[in-house]
Amino acid sequence: MIQIENLSFTYSDEGTVSRTILDNVSLTIKPGEAVAIMGPNGSGKTTFARCLNGLLLPASGTVLIDGLDTRDQAQLPEIRRKIGMVFQNPDNQIVSATVEREIAFGLENLGVPCAEMHEIVDNMLTEFNLQHYRLHAPHYLSGGEKQRLALAAVMAMRPRYLALDEPTSLLDPKSRADILHIIKQLHCRQNHPVTTLLITQFPDEALHADRLLVFHNGRILMDDAPARVFSRVDELLAIGLEPPLEFVLK
Ligand SMILES: Nc1ncnc2c1ncn2[C@@H]1O[C@H](COP(=O)(O)OP(=O)(O)O)[C@@H](O)[C@H]1O
Ligand SMILES: [Mg+2]
């Protein structure tokens, strides 16, 4: 379970007036939920995602991942094993010279035995449809393939939670559909289901979630089933968010 209580966050840049970026956010995410997050640019979505795995620490309030507090330095490695992160640009995330090494990277760091590591790498190559690229340099993959690789490398670590920050925003429509399909699959796979938090600017992606959060000015403005959120057309348009067309035309 992810438990967030009264989370506030402020970037403290020297010489500038500090501004509250997250303002008293409280939220519980239960295992198995598929949560989508939308909100205008600058509403604090990325900052929120970075607070989940301790990349950023609360100015006040708490973030607990399965009871582990992100402010406890000693717990950070365990927290980061529990919650995988995927960002907008896979180029910022991929570090290895070949596809298979990229998937093995985190496992090697954890000291996973060789035979087990090979099995996991093989499974990930198949699951993410990268088997033909095993020895390829990630650099030469397409944007969609790179994002599949970033996902495969994160999922190799078997996280319980997966936070995705606009993972499809740089992709062409076909790759976007592929990634979205994979995210949905992850959520319902039998052997290792994952709780997903998908930050997205595309309303059609949010429609598939169990629950949609709308951020505005560092607060959670709405938290409900996507169809119920999208039926609040005027309120969404007022903050610059467009519901899917079928809700606008109703
Ligand atoms: N490193 C930083 N230093 C200062 N302000 C920042 C920094 N990163 C983001 N911000 C500010 O925090 C606010 C929220 O940013 P962000 O969490 O990236 O929003 P979103 O992902 O919803 O677009 C924005 O106003 C942004 O300018
Ligand atoms: Mg962002």
Image (cartoon, rainbow, N blue to C red):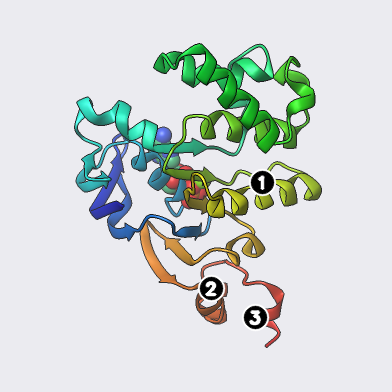
Looking at the rendered structure, the kind of residue marked 2 is Leu
Q: Residue at x 42, y 50 (%)?
A: 44
Q: Which mark is residue 247?
A: 3
**Please, what secondary structure does the residue beneath circle 3 have?**
helix
Residue 58 lies in what quarter of the image?
Answer: top left
67 and 37: which is toward the camera: 67
Q: Residue at x 57, y 73 (%)?
A: 237
Q: Residue at x 55, y 55 (%)?
A: 188
Q: Taking the image as drawn, is residue 100 in sight?
A: yes
**Please, what secondary structure does the residue beneath circle 1 have?**
loop
66 and 167: which is toward the camera: 66
Q: Is mark 1 within 8 Å of ligand 2?
A: no
Q: Count neighbours of disc 2 (C-alpha within 10 A) and say few if under 14, some if 14 to 19, many if 20 or more.
A: some
Looking at the rendered structure, the kind of residue marked 1 is Ser
**According to the image, label 1 marks what residue?**
169
Instruction: Give the Cα distance between marks 1 and 3.
Output: 22 Å
In the rendered image, residue 241, in percent from the top left (x then y), is placed at: 58, 67
Of tags 2 and 1, which is closer to the observer?
Answer: 1
Q: Count neighbours of disc 1 (C-alpha within 10 A) and say few if under 14, some if 14 to 19, many if 20 or more.
A: some
Looking at the rendered structure, the kind of residue marked 3 is Phe
**According to the image, label 2 marks what residue?**
236
User: Taking 208 as reference, is 174 left or right?
Assistant: right
Q: Are marks 1 and 3 in contact (CB under 8 Å)?
A: no
Q: Count neighbours of disc 3 (C-alpha within 10 A) and say few if under 14, some if 14 to 19, many if 20 or more.
A: some
